[in-house]
Amino acid sequence: MAVEQIEHADDHMQECIDNCLEAAQVCEWCADACLDEGEEMARCVRLCRDVADIASLHARFMARNSSYHAELGELCADLCEECAEECEGHDHDHCQACAEILPNCVESCREMASS
């Protein structure tokens, strides 16, 4: 859960920070687990690693009230959407967890990008 004392963060930003951090965590887990699944999982690994980096960066940009967080939020949403679609195509538990969690990040990042 995001730090509630961040003065500039309203409920929507708090939720987006939480969703980004959760996306980063699940994608780190998925990428690591996919490494054991074989070469056919290379795209999933790459997308998950990208999401983990961008989502955690977006959370940090929001926490410090960067004037660039909206632009990064749109990129984060696009990447999370692509990663969720990739993960949906795999039966592994870690991929299914990503496919389930990432849409929350997509929605909140798009809302932050448009505000």
Image (tube, rainbow, N blue to C red):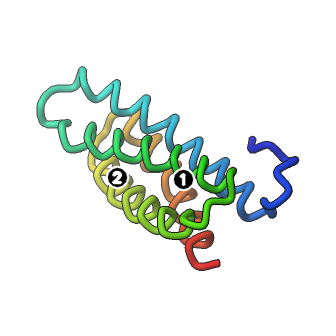
Q: Earlier in the sequence, mark 2 or mark 1?
A: 1
| Of residues 95 and 83, the one drawn nearer to the viewer in this rendering | 83
Question: Mark 2: which amino acid?
Answer: Cys
Disc 2 versus disc 1: distance between alpha carbons? 16 Å
Q: Which residue is mark 2?
A: 83
Measured along the vertical axis of the image, is residue 62 above or below residue 32?
A: below
> x and y percent of residue 3 in the render?
80, 43
The residue sitting at the bottom extreme is: 114
> x and y percent of residue 43 in the render?
20, 44
> x and y percent of residue 58 in the render?
54, 53
> x and y percent of residue 39 in the render?
12, 31
Question: Mark 1: which amino acid?
Answer: His
State the residue at coordinates (43%, 38%): 27
- Could you tell whether 91 is left or right of 110 in the image? left
Q: Quadrant of the C terminus?
A: bottom right
**Residue 98, label in figure:** none
Q: Which residue is mark 1?
A: 58
